[in-house]
Amino acid sequence: MKDATNRWQGEKISWRMATSYDATQAFIKAMSSSNNPSRQSVLEKLPSINLSPNESSGNGLKFIEGEPKKEPVLVKVANGEFKKN
């Protein structure tokens, strides 16, 4: 999240916002790399999309076997409060 915070000049963002931003950028890149974008062509292109840190929320994005290669996020609820570990 430090990379994302730096990218957005100190603005506080959540991991959900960063993940949504990355997914949108990957979708745009997959769609724009197709001559005739369709659901099928975007789905076929997504696994080959690689976003640099400058194109993403800060860490870059690469898909491995159809899933984004990212560190897992551990979430803990304690005393009724949401905490990210």
Image: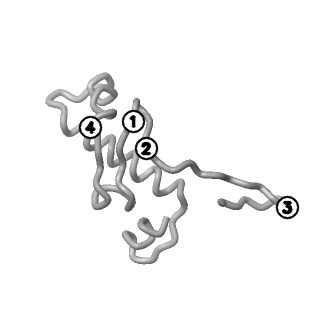
Nearer the N terminus, badge 2 or badge 3? Answer: 2
* 2 or 3: mark nearer the eye: 2
Nearer the N terminus, badge 3 or badge 4? Answer: 4
Find disc 3 in the rendering and name its residue. 79
Query: 34 left or right of 11?
Result: left
Residue located 40% across and 45% down the image = 23
Find disc 2 in the rendering and name its residue. 69
Cβ atoms at labels 1 and 4 below 8 Å apart: no
Nearer the N terminus, badge 1 or badge 3? Answer: 1
> Marks 1/3: CA distance?
36 Å
Q: In the structure shown, which secondary structural element does the residue marked by tag 3 occupy?
A: loop
The label number, if any, that marks residue 15 in the structure image: none
Query: 12 left or right of 82?
Result: left
Q: In the structure shown, which secondary structural element does the residue marked by tag 4 occupy?
A: helix
> Marks 1/4: CA distance?
15 Å
Cβ atoms at labels 1 and 2 below 8 Å apart: yes
Nearer the N terminus, badge 1 or badge 4? Answer: 4
Give percent across and percent down for residue 56.
34, 56
* 4 or 2: mark nearer the eye: 2
Find disc 4 in the rendering and name its residue. 30
> Marks 2/3: CA distance?
32 Å
The label number, if any, that marks residue 64 in the structure image: 1
